[in-house]
Structure formats: structure tokens, C-alpha cells
């Protein structure tokens, strides 16, 4: 039986995460701000945070290159981690599930970086990456849906899952018709961050509040999933509008 | 990450032995990492590499 109430460990975990967050904020602050203001519809995670994160991952990329790790191996590792994240969600292990989701997102960034630096960024690799990304996202949402199967939160989970797939599908379909779509406030990194952070934060709050409430609560995760559903839907529609505008009166291919 | 996963195992699962192993390994790694960070901070290039790539 999983331990139901561990406020002391939760306090320790909160301190560890707070130190890591302070170091992250300090790292981001050292990255020069972007020269141009953000465009409307730009991703929520701005260029400054992206640049800091890429810099943080650079030593890991170096090691992967030195060890001769194939980008496909990193892509499949992302799928395996996402399946573990889904299983953790299913079991209600939200702290673990949250960090596994963030780890899966990190591997998603790493595989492209390794492919580019090895000079093996191919169309086949891009296809495998896109397909594995969809399965990985579905594995995570499947576990989340299974956990909330008897709860109203299942509805936002379903909407978030469908909208996440639609965000990617709309871009892929538009690009196949010749329209490049870069816009979208909530893309894959944002989805990983909202879901991952919502999950581990929810578990921390649950363990910290359990002496008072006397039962676990997943209110923070429910809020994060609802937010994700709303923002993903808005992004999918935003992309659909952008694609329709870009196509205009072009004849069908 | 080791420390965080250790705390996660301790919070969420019945595998408390695994949790302690992760937490011990994570605490050692985090201590070593923070020690290195403090030394690099005095060199002025903690976390973000200098323009020379150092």
C-alpha cells in the first residue's frame, strides 16, 4: 500500500525543488533578453528560457555524442519514459509521474539536438520523432485518464489529449498543403511543463495538506489539466485559423 | 534528478528501500554538484558558459 501521508518528506522535497528552481531562475537571468519583442501567438516558453535550457543540456548532448548514442535511441527512450509516466499516473504516483513527464520532454529536446550535431537529421528521423511523440503523449494521457476514470477531470483529460494531437495534426496537414505554421502558444514543451509541474506540485500540496484534510487531494493537478485543455484547444484553433488564412483561395493539390 | 526521484518513491510508493537508495545517491550527487557550482560561481561562469565556451 502506498504511503498516504508524508508531510515531512514533502517539506524536504519542496526545499530541494525550491533550491533547483532558484538555480534555474539565476541561470535564466544570466541569458541576455531577446532583442525583439514576442510576436502574438508566440510559444509561452520564451526564447530566453529555451536558450538557458539548451545551454543546460549541452553537456549531456556532448556525452551522448561522445558515447555514439543514436538520436533514434533517445527518441525511443522518450517513449519508454512516457509509458512509465503513464503507469505512474495510473497508480496515482503523481510526484514521480510529474518528473517523468518532464524527463520525457527533456529527451524530446535532446533527440533533435543530438541528430543535428551528429549531422544525421534526416526526413526519416523527423518522421519517427513525430510518430513517437504522438504515442508518447497518448501513453501519458492514457494513464492520467485511467487515474481520473471516475471523476469529472476525465473530461478535461480527454479534451487535452485530443487538442494536443490536433495542435500537431493541424500543423502537419497545413505544411503538407504548403503553409508553414510556427505559431502556437502551447506547443509540446509547454504541454510537458504544464502537465509535469501540475502533477508534482499537486502531490506536494496533497502530502503537505493531508494532516489538515485527512485525505489526499489532486485539486492542483485537476486545475493544471483543465488549463492544459483550454490552452491546447485555443492553440489548435489558433493554428487552424492561421492555416486557413495562409491557404486563402489556393486550389486543392 | 536522483534525489527528486528518491523523494518521489518515498512519497508515492511502497518501495521505501529503493527510495532510500535513490535519495542517498541523489544527495551525494547534489552535494558534489553544488560544491562544483560554488567553485565555478567564483569563476563567474556557473550554469551559463562564458562567450569563450569555458
Image (tube, coloured by chain):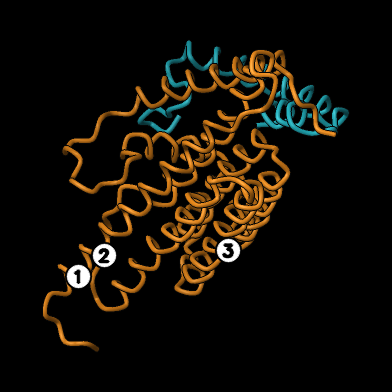
Chain colours: A orange, B cyan
State left or right for residue B52 relative to residue A250.
Answer: right
N-terminal of the pair, mark 3 or mark 1, is 3
Residue mark closest to the camera, 3 vs 2:
2
Instruction: Note whether A64 is above or below A197 in the view shown.
Output: below
Q: Secondary structure at mark 3?
A: helix
- Do marks 3 and 2 share a chain? yes
Separation of marks 3 and 2 at Cα, in angstroms: 22 Å
Residue A252 location, x and y as percent?
Answer: 22, 87
User: What subunit carries mark 2?
Assistant: A
Q: Which mark is residue B29?
A: none
Crowd band around label 1 with a 10 angstrom C-alpha radius: few (<14), some (14–19), many (20+): few
State left or right for residue A173 relative to residue A140.
Answer: left
Toward which corner of the image does residue B16 lie, by quadrant?
A: top right
Check the image and name the residue furthest to the right.
B17
N-terminal of the pair, mark 3 or mark 2, is 3
Residue A108 location, x and y as percent?
Answer: 52, 52
Toward which corner of the image does residue A93 lie, by quadrant?
A: top right
Residue designated by label 3: A135
Instruction: Note whether A178 is above or below A221 in the view shown.
Output: below
Residue A11 location, x and y as percent?
Answer: 64, 14
Q: Residue at x 45, y 62 (%)?
A: A165
Assign the N terminus of chain A to one quadrant of the image.
Answer: top right
Toward which corner of the image does residue B6 lie, by quadrant?
A: top right
Q: Residue at x 35, y 39 (%)?
A: A45
- Do marks 3 and 1 share a chain? yes
Q: Which mark is residue A244?
A: 1
User: What subunit carries mark 3?
Assistant: A
Q: Are marks 1 and 2 in contact (CB under 8 Å)?
A: yes
State left or right for residue B16 relative to residue A248.
Answer: right
Residue designated by label 2: A240
Separation of marks 1 and 2 at Cα, in angstroms: 6 Å
Assign the C terminus of chain A to one quadrant of the image.
Answer: bottom left
Amino acid at each position: 500500500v502506498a504511503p498516504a501521508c508524508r508531510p515531512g518528506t514533502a517539506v524536504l522535497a519542496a526545499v530541494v525543488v525550491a533550491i533547483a528552481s532558484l538555480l534555474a531562475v539565476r541561470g535564466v537571468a544570466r541569458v541576455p533578453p531577446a532583442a525583439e519583442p514576442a510576436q502574438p501567438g508566440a510559444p509561452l516558453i520564451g526564447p530566453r528560457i529555451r536558450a538557458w535550457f539548451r545551454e543546460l543540456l549541452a553537456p549531456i548532448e556532448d556525452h551522448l555524442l561522445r558515447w555514439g548514442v543514436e538520436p533514434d535511441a533517445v527518441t525511443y527512450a522518450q517513449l519508454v519514459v512516457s509509458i512509465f509516466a503513464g503507469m505512474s499516473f495510473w497508480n496515482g504516483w503523481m510526484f514521480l509521474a510529474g518528473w517523468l513527464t518532464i524527463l520525457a520532454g527533456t529527451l524530446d529536446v535532446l533527440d533533435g539536438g543530438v541528430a543535428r550535431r551528429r549531422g544525421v537529421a534526416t526526413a526519416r528521423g523527423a518522421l519517427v520523432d513525430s510518430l513517437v511523440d504522438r504515442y508518447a503523449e497518448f501513453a501519458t494521457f492514457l494513464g492520467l485518464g485511467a487515474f481520473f476514470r471516475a471523476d469529472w477531470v476525465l473530461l478535461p483529460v480527454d479534451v487535452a489529449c485530443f487538442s494536443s494531437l490536433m495542435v500537431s495534426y493541424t500543423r502537419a496537414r497545413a505544411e503538407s498543403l504548403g503553409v508553414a505554421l510556427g505559431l502556437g502558444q502551447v506547443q509540446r514543451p509547454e504541454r510537458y511543463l504544464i502537465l509535469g509541474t501540475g502533477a508534482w506540485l499537486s502531490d506536494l500540496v496533497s502530502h503537505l495538506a493531508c494532516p489538515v484534510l485527512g485525505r489526499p487531494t489532486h485539486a492542483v493537478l485537476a486545475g493544471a489539466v483543465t488549463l492544459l485543455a483550454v490552452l491546447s484547444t485555443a492553440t489548435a484553433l489558433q493554428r487552424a485559423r492561421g492555416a486557413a488564412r495562409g491557404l486563402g483561395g489556393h486550389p486543392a493539390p | 534528478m536522483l534525489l527528486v526521484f528518491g523523494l518521489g518513491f518515498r512519497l508515492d510508493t511502497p518501495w521505501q528501500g529503493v527510495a532510500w537508495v535513490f535519495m542517498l545517491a541523489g544527495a551525494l550527487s547534489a552535494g558534489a554538484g553544488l560544491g562544483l557550482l560554488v567553485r565555478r560561481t567564483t569563476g563567474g561562469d556557473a550554469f551559463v558558459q562564458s562567450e569563450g565556451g569555458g
